[in-house]
Image: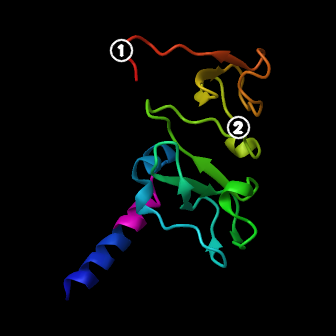
């Protein structure tokens, strides 16, 4: 077997393994996932990349529901189909508007939003951090934390 064929097979094995990772680990290896392309069938829960994240790497997305992608339904403009995933440089998730109950925030979840860290005060939180003090509270990193 030639080296190119072996490298292609190794990449495929890595992609198969990467598909089983939880979101917190998947964002660490975003480059392992294929880029989004129109006309492709996506399964709910499948990871893909599109554009760049806050750190200059590939932006990772997770398909929210099974569908066949279309040119006019890009990941960054179709939250009903794709959920962006990512961490800031300190390792905190970047807040994204939940598309529904499947990705709402729960009590204790900490996210970065508009330059600050916020902790959810409720389960099933779909509100924007800072919009209502009943749902989110400012969060201070523990001493020695990231």
User: Label 1, label 2: how many angstroms apart (C-alpha)?
Assistant: 29 Å
Task: Identify the image quadrant of residue 74.
Answer: bottom right
- Which of the two discs, 1 and 2, sits closer to the camera? 1
| Helix, strand or loop: magenta stretch | helix
Tag shown at residue 32: none
Residue 36 is left or right of residue 29, and the answer is right
Residue 110 is left or right of residue 67, and the answer is left
Tag shown at residue 144: 1
Residue 79 is left or right of residue 12, and the answer is right
Q: Is residue 99 above or below residue 3?
A: above
At x 45%, y 33%, the residue is 91
Residue 7 image position (x, y, % from top left): 27, 76
Q: Residue furthest bottom?
A: 1
Helix, strand, or loop for circle 1?
loop
Residue interval drawn in magenta: 14-21
Residue 71 image position (x, y, % from top left): 71, 73
Residue 146 image position (x, y, % from top left): 40, 23
At x 75%, y 20%, the residue is 135
Tag shown at residue 104: 2
Helix, strand, or loop for circle 2?
loop
- Counting labels gives 2
Q: Residues within 10 Å of mark 2 (few under 14, many from 20)?
A: some
Q: Is residue 93 above or below residue 144?
A: below
| Of pointers 1 and 2, the one earlier in the residue sequence | 2
At x 79%, y 19%, the residue is 132
At x 69%, y 72%, the residue is 69
């Amino acid at each position: 077997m030639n080296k190119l064929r072996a490298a292609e097979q190794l990449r495929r094995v890595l992609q198969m393994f990467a598909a089983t990772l939880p979101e917190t680990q998947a964002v660490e290896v975003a480059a392992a996932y294929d880029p989004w392309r129109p006309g492709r069938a996506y399964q709910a829960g499948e990871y893909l990349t599109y554009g760049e994240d806050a750190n200059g790497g590939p932006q990772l997305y997770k398909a929210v529901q099974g569908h066949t992608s279309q040119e006019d339904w890009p990941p960054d403009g179709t939250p009903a189909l794709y959920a962006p995933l990512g961490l800031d440089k300190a390792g905190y998730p970047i807040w994204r508007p939940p598309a529904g109950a499947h990705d709402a925030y729960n009590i204790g979840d900490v996210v970065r939003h508009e330059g600050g860290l916020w902790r959810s005060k409720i389960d099933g939180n779909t509100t924007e951090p800072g919009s209502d003090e009943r749902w989110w509270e400012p969060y201070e990193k523990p001493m020695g934390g990231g």
